[in-house]
Amino acid sequence: MGLHECKSADNENAAAARDESRHAGLDKRERAQLRTKLYARLRELESGIEKAEARLGEIHALQADPDAYANGLVTPEISAEGHSLEQNLPAMVAEWENVGTEIEALKS
């Protein structure tokens, strides 16, 4: 196991412990309601990540095609959109991981 994997596991364990303590005062109904909201957010994030990754793939394919430049398909706006997606995807994935961790903490 590499250093990054160890740090990642430590971060996940710390996040799970925080989530468990944060949810300790909730009754069964409140935990179920929160879990429902978190599952909905998880689905939103999964959908958003899939769409962003697909669009980024399209943009990268365009940028890799010399004909796309010749035909004017690669515009500054397309390049900016690709850059924006590359910047935003890691935060979306991190939130998805955090929501998943919080859901797991509510199960215990």
Image: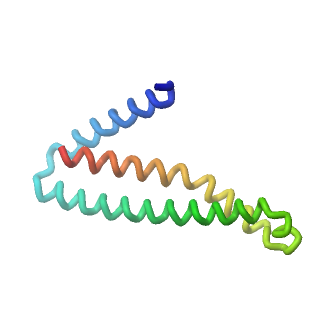
Q: Position of residue 16 (x, y in %)?
A: 30, 39
Number of numbered discs overlaid on the protein picture: 0
Who is closer to the viewer here, 79 or 1?
A: 1
Q: In the rendered view, does 34 fall on the left or right side of 41?
A: left
Who is closer to the viewer here, 25 or 29?
A: 29
Q: In the rendered view, does 106 fall on the left or right side of 7?
A: left
Who is closer to the viewer here, 66 or 99?
A: 66
Residue at 79%, 69% (x, y): give it. 75
Residue at 44%, 34% (x, y): give it. 8
Q: Position of residue 14 (x, y in %)?
A: 34, 33
Q: Position of residue 12 (x, y in %)?
A: 37, 37
Picture quadrant of residue 19: top left
Picture quadrant of residue 24: top left
Q: In this figure, which colouring scheme has been used for the structure?
A: rainbow
Residue at 64%, 61% (x, y): give it. 57
Residue furthest out toward the right: 70
Who is closer to the viewer here, 19 or 39?
A: 39
7, above or below 79, in the image: above
Q: Quadrant of the C terminus?
A: top left
Q: Position of residue 73 (x, y in %)?
A: 79, 72
Picture quadrant of residue 74: bottom right
Residue at 55%, 54% (x, y): give it. 89
47, above or below 24, in the image: below
